[in-house]
Amino acid sequence: MKFLSPRRLGSRAVVALVAAVALTACSSGSGDNSNGSPTGDFEPVAIEHALGTAEIDAQPERVVTLGMGSAETAIALGVTPVGMEEYPWGSDETGYLPWIHEELTERGEPLPEQFTGGAEVDVEAIARLAPDVILAPWSGITQEQYDLLSAIAPTVAYPELPWTITWQDQIETIGTALGRHDESLDLITGIDDTFERTAAEHPEYAGVTFSYIYNTGPSTLGVFMPDEQRVAMVRGLGLTVDPVAETLEETEGTDSAVIGLENAGLLKDSDLIFTFYSDPANRAEIESQAVYQQIPAIARGSLVAPEEQPFVTGSSMINPLTVPWSIDRYVPLVDEAIAKLDR
């Protein structure tokens, strides 16, 4: 059965369709793939968020995740999702994000079923999985999508704006939803400890400043703000965000400031530049711009720009699986960029 767009169905018809699929899933033996071990002392919780309230009355065993980072945190808490949004741009030849594939393969656990997310989220596929909870605290789901999803199971969306939750709040929110709040705090502490240890192992990083930039095509230039997750990942290595970031006006809902290539001179004091490109053609196009090449860090080669899509994705989010995976790959690139500084 093909799922029809809500635009082609009335709201009551859509909810009825989703409910019917969910009932079919529940009665078809899908419970054989449940994950997690109930603690036996789960206390019902109500998690308020921008799109509504998720009321979770019993220990979730069947978990579905949307957006980024939630599947990894659930796995780290001992609950392997039965389903997760696919992320083709960051996946490797296995079709999965490599840190998830590696972790679950090592544990000998089944991989989650993947489904289409984003603007065309496959609500029917999610309903067939018969989830107890749907976790989407770092996502861009719309109110319309939320209304459909919450008809299937309690759904946890973002606290204020799409894609802007901090990594600490994301982990704690997921821990609360799964009845593992104390364990989630331990995960946060573990990540902080990993960052502190990495910085201590690389005292040469202290005082080295950086800006993390991006482009959306020729003549464009954006700077990610200090608390954006990919910036926070680099900060965790022991590097320092160029203070210029604090002077920029954030573009609402983006965790970044769009400054335009004409303002590239604002980055003159950044020792290192971190960035990524959508593909080799985009890189060639952007780096061919004379103004771009005049940014001092880029001119001297103090540029960290990973080309492997899984690495770009993994280093863009902070959670218990991506941090150790990304740090191991970041350090040699940072060392190479620092070696080109005039000291």
Image (spheres, rainbow, N blue to C red):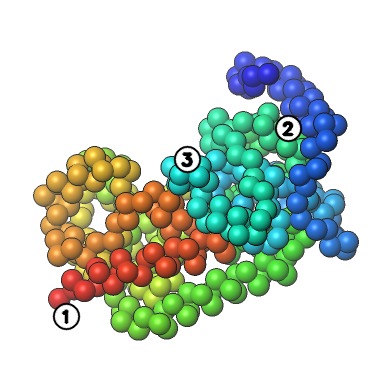
Q: Secondary structure at mark 1?
A: loop
Quadrant for residue 217, please give it: top left
Distance, label 2 to label 3, CA atoms, is: 22 Å
Give yes or no for contact between labels 1 and 3 (Cβ–Cβ under 8 Å).
no
* Residue 343 numbered mark, or none: 1
Relative image position of residue 33 (x, y in whole percent): 76, 44
Relative image position of residue 339 (x, y in whole percent): 21, 74
* Residue 128 numbered mark, or none: 2
> What crowding class fits label 2: few (fewer than 14 Cα within 10 Å), some (14-19), or many (20 or more)?
many
**How many numbered marks appear?**
3
Name the residue that disc number 3 marks: 88
Residue occupying the far top of the picture: 8
Camera sees residue 207: yes
Residue type, label 2: Arg
Camera-nearest label, 1 or 2: 2
Residue drawn at 72 percent across, 33 percent down: 127
Near-viewer residue (33 or 66): 33
Residue drawn at 76 percent across, 55 percent down: 36
* Residue 57 numbered mark, or none: none
Distance, label 1 to label 3, CA atoms, is: 41 Å
